[in-house]
Each structure stands twice: as structure tokens, then as C-alpha cells.
Image: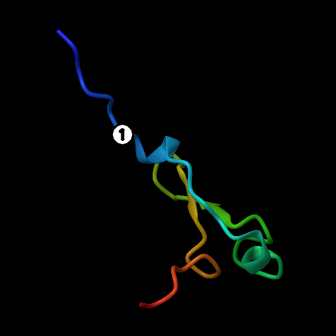
Amino acid sequence: MAQAAHLDPCTADPRLDVARARDCEECRGWGTVVTPDPDGCLVLCPACQRPADS
């Protein structure tokens, strides 16, 4: 029996904008931060990688 792939937020491939991350104090230019939960997932930096408001 085939099963659907489980989407793990820790393995999601975030698309970050390096230009926006360059001078960010929060992520120190990386564009991602490690979450404080025990899994320690990488997520886009909330300070510099916010999506543009539509």
C-alpha cells in the first residue's frame, strides 16, 4: 500500500532573499533562524524575510 510523503517543516526548503538578509542583526545575514523548540528547525528570519504585503 502506497503512502503519501509526510511534509516535515524542518526539511522544508525555504526560499530566502540574501539581499534582504545582508544587514540583518537578528539572523546575522543568514536569512534563517533556528526555532527554540526541541527539534531546532530552520525557519525564515521573521525580521528580514517577511513576505511583501499584498
Quadrant location of the C terminus? bottom left
> Residue at 52% of width from left, 86% of height from top?
52
Q: Residue at x 61, y 82 (%)?
A: 47
In the image, 31: left or right of 35?
A: right
**Total number of numbered discs in the rendering:** 1
Kindly give the residue lying farthest to the front in the view shown. Answer: 54
- Nearer to me, 34 or 17: 17
Residue 15 image position (x, y, % from top left): 60, 60
Q: Position of residue 10 (x, y in %)?
A: 49, 45
Residues 43 and 54: in front is: 54
Residue bearing the label numbered 1: 7
Q: Nearer the viewer, residue 25 or 4?
A: 4
Judge the density around disc 1: few (<14), some (14-19), many (≥20) Cα neighbours within 10 Å.
few
Residue at position x 23%, y 20% from top?
3
**8 with respect to 27 (left or right):** left
Q: Given the current orientation, which residue lies at the most extreme bottom position?
A: 53
**Picture quarter with the N terminus:** top left
Where disc 1 sits, the SS reads loop
Write down the quadrant of residue 49 in the picture.
bottom right
Q: Decide: is 4 above or below 20.
A: above
- Measured as percent of width and height from the top left, residue 45 is found at 60, 71
In this view, the residue farthest toward the top is: 1
Question: How has the structure been colored for display?
Answer: rainbow
Q: Quadrant of residue 43?
A: bottom right
Residue type at the position of mark 1 = Leu
Question: In the image, residue 34 lies at what x, y percent?
Answer: 60, 57
Name the side, left or right, on which 46 lies relative to 27. Answer: left
35 above or below 25? above
